[in-house]
Image (cartoon, grey):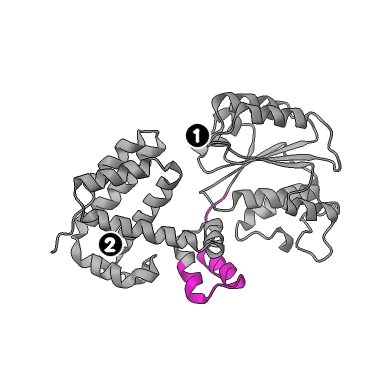
């Protein structure tokens, strides 16, 4: 199954390949897992396997003599595959209505029409309820592939009508090998692998787009500056971050890795740090704080993330977090 071109998720690939080979396809699948773990990538590969002209249990796009369908699917130019994503942060009912209208028509070229709906948890209630009609009584030629990294926010009625494929982070060995195969130096590959926390998509994006690492560095520098800042500066930063909703989770996640690394050094386990390129700075930071301060900072971060996911006012939650950031205990 080499042509699936999927890093990790072997059990899921085997499951989906068997479904294609046996001709026992469900009308709807829901791929769940952390952001950038590979859900959409797997859904695309599954769509290629379903639509492949050769009728195998794997897409042929990785082969030198790939069929025309697999080539066009890979290029995003195949008429019987559509991808629906959030517009202005939500999936609107109009998008679902367009999907339903198109789904009612026969495929233009193949046996199936495949729709990939990314982040179904972003669907507005009217959009999710409208989609239920298609999930309940789908045309026989339609296959829906949904993704979600917040399964708890998807409607239970949507979950119950899909075959759920839960994806977990890939192994660090698999990610590092993939990065080195794509030209990363061993030291760079190790750093990106540790920072990825098993998220294949993040690691590959960071390799292709160096500005992501620059942003990560800025977030850490901002955290360190805030620990020595006063209440006014802290609240100003919280207000600014609250206006960039898409950056909140990533920023807090990077702060969590920092405090975790500081705690590891304080406990005598420096080999486990994630921020490998900042070992010297981490060692210095470990001397400036008491372990209980660092543990408290981590607990506050986790609680803040939980509150924001529970739809608590983000500005208020970030204000509290910023004000509770520890100050260096050692001058």
The residue lying toward the viewer, choosing from 321 and 7, is: 321
- Say which residue appears at 69% left-offset and 54% top-offset: 14
What is the crowding at mark 2: few (fewer than 14 residues within 10 Å), some, or many (at least 20)? many
- The residue pinned by badge 1 equals 153
Magenta span covers which residues? 167-191
What is the crowding at mark 1: few (fewer than 14 residues within 10 Å), some, or many (at least 20)? some
Asked whether disc 1 touches disc 2, contact meaning CB atoms under 8 Å apart, the reply is no
User: Please, what secondary structure does the residue beneath circle 1 have?
Assistant: helix
First-in-chain label (1 vs 2): 1
Q: Give the left or right position of residue 206, taking residue 137 as reference.
A: left
- Quick check: 133 above or below 174? above
- Quick check: 284 above or below 199? below
Quarter holding residue 265: bottom left
**Residue 64 percent across, percent down from the top left:** 81, 66
Q: Quadrant of the C terminus?
A: bottom left
Which SS type dominates the magenta stretch? helix
Residue 166 drawn in magenta: no
Residue 183 drawn in magenta: yes
- The residue pinned by badge 2 equals 263
Quarter holding residue 181: bottom right
- Say which residue appears at 51% left-offset and 65% top-offset: 172
Q: Give the left or right position of residue 278, taking residue 49 as reference.
A: left
* Residue lying at the far bottom of the rendered structure: 186
Q: Give the left or right position of residue 73, taking residue 299 as reference.
A: right
**Residue 210 percent across, percent down from the top left:** 50, 64
């Amino acid at each position: 199954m080499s042509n699936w071109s999927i890093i990790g998720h072997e059990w899921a690939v085997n499951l989906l390949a068997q479904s294609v080979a046996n001709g026992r396809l469900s009308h709807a699948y829901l791929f769940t897992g952390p952001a950038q773990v590979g859900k959409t990538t797997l859904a695309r590969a599954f769509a290629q396997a379903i639509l492949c002209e050769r009728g195998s249990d794997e897409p042929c796009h990785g082969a030198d003599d790939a069929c025309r369908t697999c080539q066009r699917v890979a290029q995003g130019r195949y008429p019987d595959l559509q991808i629906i994503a959030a517009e202005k942060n939500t999936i609107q009912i109009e998008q679902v209505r367009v999907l339903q209208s198109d789904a009612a028509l026969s495929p233009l070229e193949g046996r199936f029409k495949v729709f990939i709906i990314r982040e179904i948890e972003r669907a507005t209630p009217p959009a999710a309820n409208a989609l239920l009609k298609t999930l309940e009584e789908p045309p026989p030629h339609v296959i829906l592939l949904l993704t979600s990294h917040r399964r708890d926010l998807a409607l239970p009625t949507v979950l119950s009508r899909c075959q759920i494929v839960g994806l977990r982070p890939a192994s660090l060995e698999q990610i590092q090998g993939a990065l080195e195969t794509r030209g990363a130096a061993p030291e760079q590959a190790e750093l990106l692998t540790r920072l990825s926390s098993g998220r294949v998509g993040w690691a590959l994006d960071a390799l292709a787009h160096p500005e992501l690492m620059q942003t990560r560095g800025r977030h850490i520098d901002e955290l360190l500056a805030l620990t020595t800042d006063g209440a006014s500066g802290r609240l100003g930063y919280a207000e600014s971050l609250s206006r960039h909703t898409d950056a909140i989770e990533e920023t807090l996640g990077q702060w969590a890795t920092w405090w975790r690394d500081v705690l590891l050094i304080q406990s005598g386990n420096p080999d486990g740090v994630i921020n490998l390129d900042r070992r010297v700075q981490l060692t210095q930071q470990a001397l400036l704080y008491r372990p209980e301060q660092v543990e408290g900072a981590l607990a506050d971060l986790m609680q803040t993330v939980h509150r924001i996911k529970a739809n608590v006012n983000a500005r208020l939650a970030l204000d509290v977090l910023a004000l509770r950031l520890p100050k260096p205990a050692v001058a």
